[in-house]
Amino acid sequence: MSKIKRLAGETVLYGLGSIVPRFFNFMLVPLHTSVFTPEEYGIVTILFSYTAVVNTVYMFGMETAYFRFATKPGADEKSIYRLTQTVVIAISGVLSLIAMLFSEPLATALDVPDKPQLIMWLAAIMFIDAIVAIPFARLRLQKKPFRFALGKFINIMILVALNVYYLVIYYTPDTRIDFVFLANLIANLFYILFFFKILSIWRPRYDKQITPVIFNYGYPVMLTGLAGMTNEMFSRIMLNFWLPKDFYPGQSSAYAVGVFGASYKFAVIMNLAITSFRYAAEPFFFSNAVDKNSPQLFARINHYFIIVCCFILLGVSINLDILKYFFGRPEYWEGLYIVPILLLAYLFLGVYYNFSVWFKLTDKTYFGTLITIGGMLITIGANYWLIPIAGYYGSSWAALLCYFGMMVACYFFGQKYLPIPYNISRAVFYITVTMMLVYGVNAISIDHQGLALTFHSGVILFFAVFIFLMERNAFKVSPR
């Protein structure tokens, strides 16, 4: 139990650097949905969706490769850092240069023909994100969560302040979309100062023996990440193309993307918890891989992870009647019914990440690539089939089907190569009970907001007591 407590503590600390900053980013939703119409918000959503997909290529799997090779017995961590950073800078530099040189045709292809500067700014944003990723990973490996959190926190404070300045104080309707991207670029420039020392002493390095091995380890991880990011962002991109005209009467496809993207923000709450957990768990899994009790330890961690995610799923889903006021315009409210589906999808994604430990520890990362590509095919096929008949509701189900399929496939392959005694029946039971509570509570309409909040709080308390009674004996036998 002591190792689990330590992991929980590190998760909280890394949460300060991931959940807290992203929470403040989430708090920009009221501002953006007040200033932007759904069509305008749809444009912002689409451009950042493309950026998230391309950014995976910039990293080329080097973050995971750094963790893997820097933690091997006898490894020279500084040398591995220089090697992985060299790969990242070379790839991201070339790609950003190409994007800047061809910014005008790219802007036309992305339906913003009069704003090529947005492409140039996005290229710079992605380049900075890439070159500081390994330094951030180094902080995680060196157990420096406070410095990690500090860098992330200052960055988001700059971003929030600039958004408020540009969209409230220095407000110009004709360029308000531009300001969102410019604010991101300026905030990212802070990272250059934050890591100035380590970036300034970096020198290109190539090792004819180690670099090809690192590269071969990293590119399947990159393909996995690319497919995974496609799974996450594809629906927002393709909704713009595959939604039939006038599916939502009188509204454009960009309007639908804006509503869908805004509703997706609530589902990101689950993803924030998953992200902070992954920051702590990835180096934890690698460092505890040789422990003879590691299978039982990993199973217990996944068990507690599912419990926490069920609380998030329940807490957010039954309080959407309050959370909807985060949106500045009522037009965005119409998409809130998809939030529980997206939260459950992200829960499955989080469990998949836990299950994926087996192919990372056995160096069979190509399995991750195959599984995620399979998920990508589900995403593409389900969106192609469901968007024309169900709009963004179909896209939310596509995400659920994708992550569920990936989770199931990863579990069965993992049990063959690295058996871990996950308590599947208990996990299915908890998730089922959670979803029954979500839809049961949401079927009860209470007009008085205070009474509704009291009732919802009582349901969450009931669920907490229920979990405690179910788990009270398990705490006594948890692996040490």
Image (tube, grey):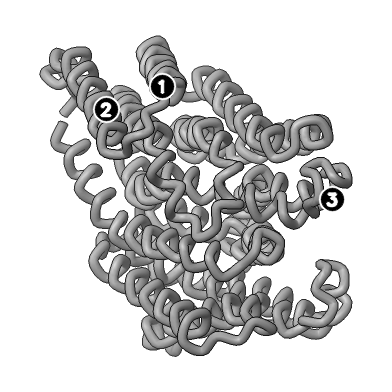
Real-space CA distance between mark 1 and mark 2, rounded to the nearest whole angstrom = 10 Å
- What SS does tag 3 mark? helix
Q: Marks 3 and 1: CB-CB under 8 Å? A: no
Residue 151: x and y in percent read: 34, 73
Can residue 212 be seen here? The reply is no
Residue sticking out furthest to the left:
476
Residue 433 placement, left or right of 64: left
Real-space CA distance between mark 3 and mark 1, rounded to the nearest whole angstrom = 37 Å
Real-space CA distance between mark 3 and mark 2, rounded to the nearest whole angstrom = 42 Å
Circle 2 is placed at which residue position?
455
What's the residue type where badge 2 is placed? Phe
The relative height of residue 300 versus residue 349 in the rendered view (above or below) is above
What's the residue type where badge 1 is placed? Ile
N-terminal of the two: label 3 or label 1? 3
Q: Quadrant of the N terminus?
A: top left
Residue 186: x and y in percent read: 51, 85
Circle 3 is placed at which residue position?
241
Which mark identifies residue 444?
A: 1
Front residue (pair 92, 313)? 313
Label 3 neighbour load within 10 Å: few <14, some 14-19, many 20+: few
Res. 35 image quadrant: bottom right
What's the residue type where badge 3 is placed? Phe
Q: Marks 1 and 2: CB-CB under 8 Å? A: yes
Front residue (pair 6, 310)? 310
